[in-house]
Amino acid sequence: MIELFLKYEFMRNALIAAVLAGVTCGIIGTYVVIKRIVFLSGGIPHATFGGIGLGYLLGINPILTAIPFSVLSAFTIGAIHKKAKVNEDTAIGIVWAVGMALGVIFIGLSHTPASDLIGYLFGDIQTVQGSTLFMMLILDIIILISVFLFHREFLIVAFDEEFSTVVGVPSKSMYFLLLGLIALGVVVLIKAVGIILVIALLTIPATISRKFTSDIKKLMFISTFAGVTLTIIGLWLSYLFDLASGATIVLVLGIAFVIFSFLSR
């Protein structure tokens, strides 16, 4: 397997992307699982489809338009939930549908062939280019710095928003910042497993890790390690058996979850 990654440049790029994706799902996925906002981690990537479509319409790299669109979608969900006093699931459903609809309209106006969208919908980590890797790295750095600076605040907000207000933590600001980081994490993971399957990388590694530890730092470390390892195994198997990389990675994650669930008992 090592020779495979050393021999081909596209596999080396895919390996780097797997590591960057693993870091994202380990850090952001921990907060998603702790705060129980798994549905949110599914809503944001689908809403981000509007940003992908906008990129095709403008004739630029869709990842560049996906970044602000993803963050805006996350903030819109938060604003609807907090300001309009609407249930969070309802807010997610609204933004989810509107984002997807905009994506379909933008892509229709751009006359983009359906084949060009497969990599963004279902993931194609083997086609990641250097420019995309650079953007993934920058987004990972932003996520890591933010978590380092506001780890305590995120932790309190993730467990109990009402208590965070009592102890003087600006819960609303931290909530929106956390949504923004989840949005950035979604963009990092899109090329790895695609918009439709992002939810798997954001939840499964952290869920597996939570079966073995309750310490947040250990949880993040184990989740990151699990995310990187399982993504690489899925990447290798997809190449070996000529399978869709995103779907194979998610199947490996699912199988690992079943195995570790059994072992944890």
Image (spheres, rainbow, N blue to C red):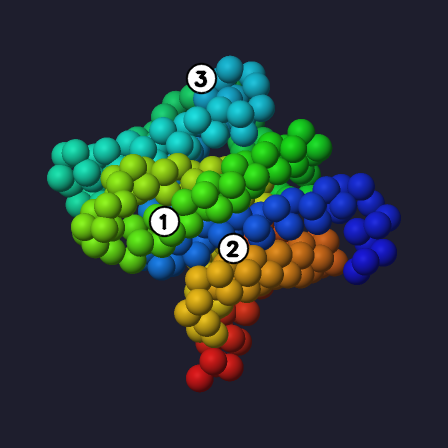
| Location of residue 141 in the rendering, given as x and y in whole percent from the top left corner | 57, 39
Picture layout, residue 3 above or below residue 84? below
Q: How many neighbours does mark 1 have within 10 angstroms: few (below 14), some (14-19), or many (20 or more)?
A: many
Seen at 55% across and 60% down, the residue is 221
Residue 191 left/right relative to 148: right
Compute the Cα span from label 1 to label 2.
Answer: 15 Å
Picture layout, residue 103 above or below residue 172? above
Compute the Cα span from label 3 to label 2.
Answer: 37 Å
Residue type at mark 3: give it.
Answer: Leu
**In which quadrant will I find the N terminus?**
bottom right
Give the secondary structure at mark 1. Answer: helix
Picture layout, residue 190 above or below residue 19? above
Compare residues 73 and 8 and report the one nearer the observer. 73
Tell which tag, 1 or 2, sits nearer the viewer: 1
Residue type at mark 2: give it.
Answer: Gly
Seen at 36% across and 49% down, the residue is 154
| Location of residue 18 in the rendering, given as x and y in whole percent from the top left corner | 64, 49
| Marked residue nearer the N-terminal end (1 or 3) | 3
Compute the Cα span from label 1 to label 3.
Answer: 40 Å
Identify the disc placed on residue 26.
Answer: 2
Picture layout, residue 178 above or below residue 104? below
Compare residues 8 and 132 and report the one nearer the observer. 132
| Location of residue 132 in the rendering, given as x and y in whole percent from the top left corner | 63, 33
Give the secondary structure at mark 3. Answer: helix
**In which quadrant will I find the C terminus?**
bottom left
| Marked residue nearer the N-terminal end (3 or 2) | 2
Identify the disc placed on residue 154.
Answer: 1
Identify the disc placed on residue 78.
Answer: none
Compare residues 210 and 44 and report the one nearer the observer. 210
Seen at 51% across and 82% down, the residue is 263
* Residue receiving disc 3: 109
Q: Is residue 79 in view?
A: yes
